[in-house]
Amino acid sequence: MGISAEITSIKTGEELHICPACGYEYGFHTSFISVNAGKNGKESPVKSTRDLYRVILICPECGARFDAGWRISFCDDGSHIVKVTSVLH
């Protein structure tokens, strides 16, 4: 099964390892999408003052993709994790 084009928002609880789409119980793969990336991979006209990436969880069983609202910035000084409490889509 291929990776879903749709990214669904998901809330994290005490533990997040079960896919809500198919019930797979062994966790997720991760990928990163630039916050500046618009739809269809085109660059968004709204620019961020730093390079932020959305952390996307991918179920290895069914390919469903989820956004828990986590953001990360990669920089020369190391990684800095930014937790976002609300995400506007």
Image (tube, helix red, strand yellow):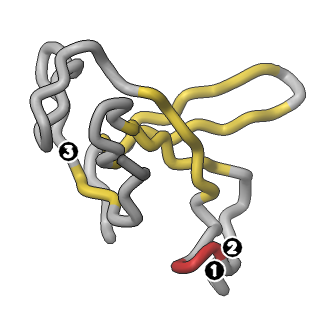
**In the rendered structure, which amino acid carries the disc numbered 1?**
Ser
Upstream in sequence: badge 3 or badge 1: 3
Residue type at tag 3: Ile
Res 44 label: 1
For this orientation, the residue located farthest to the right is: 76
Where is residue 19? Give x, y as percent.
Answer: 18, 32
Residue 6 place in picture, x, y as percent: 33, 65
Looking at the rendered structure, the number of numbered marks drawn on it comes to 3
- Give neighbour class at mark 2: few <14, some 14-19, many 20+ (Cα, 10 Å): few
2 or 3: tag closer to the N-terminus: 3
State which quarter of the image contains the C terminus. bottom left
Q: Which residue lies at the image location 36% right of the left edge and 25% below the top edge?
A: 28
Label 2 belongs to which residue? 47
Residue marked by disc 3: 10
Q: Amino acid at mark 2?
A: Lys
Q: Is residue 2 left or right of residue 33?
A: left
Q: For mark 2, give the secondary structure.
A: loop
Contact between marks 1 and 2 (CB within 8 A): the answer is yes
